[in-house]
Image (cartoon, coloured by chain):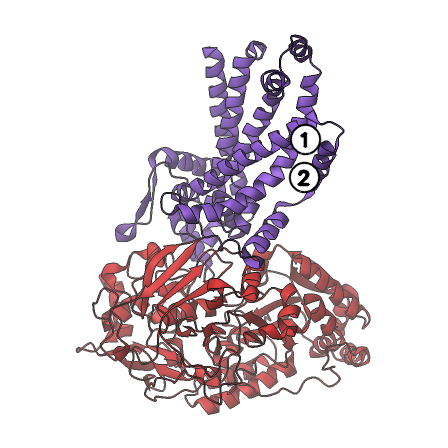
Amino acid sequence: MKRRIIGLLGLALSASLIASACGSDSSSSPDTAATNDTLAIPGTDSSTPTAGGTIHILSQLEQVTHLDPQRNYTGSDLAFVGSTMQRALTSYAYAPGSAGSQLVGDLATDTGTPTEGGKVWSFTLRGGATYEDGSEVTCADIAYGTSRVFATDIIVDGPTYAISYLDIPQDAEGNSNYPGPYTATADQQALFDKAVSCSEDGKTITFTLSRIVADFNYTVTLLAFSPVPKAKDTGEKYDMAPVSSGPYKIESYEPGKSLVLVRNENWSKASDPIRNAYADSFVYEFALDPAVIDERLMADAGDDQYAVGDGGLQPENLQTVFTDDRFKDRRQDDYDPYVSFTAFNVKTVSCVEVRRAVYLGLDREALRTAGGGPYTGDFADGFVKPALADDYAPSKLPEGLNTDGTPNIEAAKAALAEAKTKCPDVYAKATVEGLKFFHPDTPIWQKLVSIWIESLKAVGIVIKPTAVEPSKYYPTVQNDETDYDISRGAWGPDWPNASTMIPELFLTTGGFNLTRNGDDPAYKQFETDTKAALNELDRKAQGKKWQALNQFLVDQLWSIPGTFTKAQDLWGSKVGNAYRWSSSGSFLFGELYVKQ
Amino acid sequence: MTTFIARRLLFALVLLAAVSLFTYLLFALLPTDPAALTCGKNCKPELIAANRVRLGYDKPIYEQYFQFVRGIFAGRTYGTGDIAFTCPAPSLGYSFNQHECVSTLIAKTFPVTAFLSLGAFILWMLLGVGTGTLAALHRGKWQDRLTSVITSIGVSLPTFYVGLLVLFSVVIWLQWLPFPHYASPTENLHDFLTAMILPWITLAVLSAASYTRITRNGVLEAMNEDFVRFGVAKGLKNRTVIRKYVLRAALIPIVTIAGLDFAALLGGAIVTESVFSLPGMGRLAIRSVTDSDLPVLVGTTLVAAVFIVMANTIVDIIYGILDPRVRLK
């Protein structure tokens, strides 16, 4: 498991994660021409997609973070690489709005078949898929690609669900006994081959998991489960020249300058019902100053009419873009996938009344204003965003909490008075000794922490800030030895299911649990209920369970919900299909087309 | 003279060795853990420890330094088995962020910086010396005052501001030029020139301001020298006196400063390269800082230091040739 958000807020992965539907329906090719239902979605219009032309992607980054499918992880990169060059077993429908969260087969004919209650998953391969050299994509290639994830010293940065989920023995320290394909002995390789096997006819791949994973068919949408031909694998260097199985291939790639994709003549639409591949080519322009990107998109001249940015708009241009009608057909301001929060160390702040007093007394509106105002997001009412439609239900927030984000001093004082009786030790800590607030040592956080101190001073709570060098912030607060009372973070789901939000943030085995809540009296029940939700194969029933757990978390306040964050985009006037793909929170780059 | 040159060259070598050691020590003292950076965000302590051993960061710092120096002369191999790869000599390390040997990255980016520096240097020397001389020859007149105002503005404007202003106005708003996409002059001369013209102008305008002032003062000072007055008294034409007596004297310190400025620019024009998206060494250096890509940071710092030391050595030697007293010190 991995945090996809840490340190990335503001870099602009954008959009909302909307409904997700699980099942075993055959995949279908969505009609990407806008319908009446989708016309209201920014980036969609009544024009008919046409083939041809070049789409430009303007980026402030020096390169695509990873082209190697097993190392590819962030939403924008997944959308770019997945829609152009790398196919996976399953994907989400290539469609705007909530339809874009519908799970469909990609290399697989359908969305997979679970057996043993979700402990074994099989996928039947569609057949006919080929690499850019014309050779066939095989079941063995998918197994080999998956095995690369275990070479954790070389295949870095990617999602490690394969290691967590596959039924491969681990040593006493929890490390897999399979070290990946580069250094595995025959016996070690046999461990992997037992967990990931191909049928004799090579048409079915089966994953045997160490536990039930009800939404494993969502997991394999990640390119970490994409095929890699063993003979072409160059390890660390594969990132620069991966073999394409999608409709485009690399013509040239110079980090710091550009990546040019052209049509892969060996890709066949007949074998790929998802991708439409309208544009003839893509030019990814790197290392552009963000101010220059915005100016180019606003000027909308020459090739920039066919351009999109991959990093969102700069704050200083938001007012112009969202008040000037010139941009009304080519802008969007919407949720990105992330939720920010403030986590309590429940071991030291074990009193829910103190935690509630902090929530009620904190000037959240001042914090949001200092961070950039309403464009940064809406006040969150929990840890599941409305975009996860199956899993979201409005939460009942603590009584007295002002919905406009302003502090309610009286209510906070009342909660603190309750704490004085119920938990005098924690009360004394909060009001006399002070709560140790660890924050990143950045200019913006210097401002924000002063708002924390001042607003809670009015309640009678003392905040003692500790600034941590930004690159060391998360390693510091994730270290069990670190003596903090309050920390902060943000998180986005890896796929449209709260299964990659709630367990990650609040189970003691979660990838980003900053709350140290394992000893809290309410934890056992939470753990039991969470595991029940994780094992639930009925997606609707599972969603109900997440809704209840989200409310439970709001009641416990192991963390305070922050904001449902937002991002803003602008694109060239001759770009079609510039909608945010709900499953990645970014443009669905491969589906962009040039308007005639 | 030979002894003097040999001494200066030896000193330069010692200085470079000291710079490399100092840079490497700084690298070792930085709070960032280079081993942690090689295994991404899913790192476990055991994996970090394994990578530390694999890359030699577990060894004492002096041993790491010698390994680094050995790599410069003998190259280095990373990984094992089929997926092993080698950075040939002169190896300055390997960038796990950019999947490339540091020396290769520098070899790719240096020509961009060299072309940028050379073009800007020629422009600013012509502009700076020309306007400086003009201002001095018209001391107190409107030409002098106008030059003074312009140079004051030029000296005080930051590079990023001028760069963005030039880029926005010429390329985006007026659309007189296409957006610059750098290509090497041998690949595509048109793209090369359209990518370079604005950065050259930006750098030249800003640097020329200082050189105008230095030239003006140098020319005015030289005009009061006895040998100039002697030339005038001999009845030589004004133009001849200025060209052969005044400018020659005034340019000696300017050439010295220009040499050092040019060498510094070769180390990377960070801001200009960033604003104009030029894939040069300055941007490579700044990227290494933002990505905490320590091998690249050390490599670019060392190469920049080499240019400075080389320029200093050449200036020292030229001074020794021009002024024998320097050799005796």
Name chain A's colour.
red
Instruction: Give A564 or A13, whichever is nearer the viewer.
Output: A13
Q: Which residue is mark 2?
A: B155
Tell me the residue at 72%/37% (across/down): B146
- The total of numbered circles placed on residues is 2
Residue type at the position of mark 2: Val
- Residue visible at 53% across and 38% down? B120
Q: Residue furthest left?
A: A201
Question: In the rendered image, which quarter is residue A338 located in?
Answer: bottom right
Q: Which residue is mark 1?
A: B213
- Percent across and percent down for residue B226 are 69, 10
Mark 2, Cα crowd under 10 Å, few <14 / some 14-19 / many 20+, is some
Q: Which chain is purple?
A: B
Whichever of callouts 1 and 2 sits on the residue coming sooner in the sequence is: 2
Asked which secondary structure carries label 2, the reply is helix
Query: In front here: A303 or A244?
Result: A303
The type of residue carrying mark 1 is Arg
- Find residue B144 and name its label: none
